[in-house]
Image: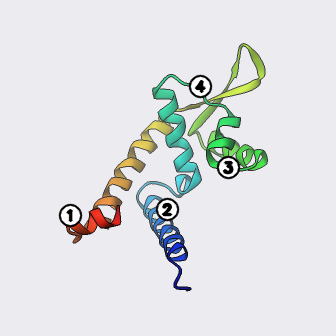
Amino acid sequence: MSGHFGALLSHTARMLRRAMDTRIAAEVTPELSGVRGMLLGEIICANNENRDVYQRDVEQWFHIRRSSVTAILQGMEQDGFITRCSVEKDARLKRLAATPKGVAYHDRIRASIDRFEHDLQQGLTPEEMAAAR
């Protein structure tokens, strides 16, 4: 690896993301690691704030193509984590909502992430944490 600081940060972020995905897959379910888990969290947050979420919102949040978002949402719907509901004002739009199963799994993912964060910070002094931030 080069000595560039940006490359080090990128490598570190990738390693952390993989470690967290591995933990979520082992402790919760491999169906919700990575983007699917983050997407479920965003949908639940929006639902809790009474905001409607549509596919175009997901495309903007994650900067991914429509076809990729369609595939992800179809898989999450088939697996029972979300539903896509028609909207009265425009039949072409489908509002995204978490199912009770999705909410339950999201709570388990949050707990897994909290444990991951705790483990990640073990042995670090407050000064080291402040420097990292």
Residue at the spot of label 3: 63
Q: Say what amino acid the circle numbered 1 marks.
A: Pro
Quadrant location of the N terminus in the rendered image: bottom right
Q: CA distance from mark 4 to mark 1?
A: 40 Å
User: Depth check: 32 or 6 in front?
Assistant: 6
Work out which residue is located at the far top of the displayed protein and give it.
88
- Among the two numbered marks 2 and 4 on one chain, the one whose residue lies closer to the N terminus: 2
Residue shown at the point (56%, 85%) measured from the top left:
2
Determine whether the residue tagged by mark 4 lies in a helix, strand or loop: loop
Quadrant location of the C terminus in the rendered image: bottom left
Q: Say what amino acid the circle numbered 3 marks.
A: His
Q: CA distance from mark 2 to mark 4?
A: 27 Å
Query: Would residue 41 be found to the left or right of residue 121 on screen?
Result: right
Residue shown at the point (56%, 44%) measured from the top left:
39
- Among the two numbered marks 2 and 3 on one chain, the one whose residue lies closer to the N terminus: 2
Query: Would residue 66 be found to the left or right of residue 15 on screen?
Result: right
Residue at the spot of label 2: 21
The numbered dot on residue 52 is 4
- Among the two numbered marks 4 and 3 on one chain, the one whose residue lies closer to the N terminus: 4
The answer to whether mark 4 and mark 1 are in CB contact below 8 A is no
Determine whether the residue tagged by mark 1 lies in a helix, strand or loop: helix
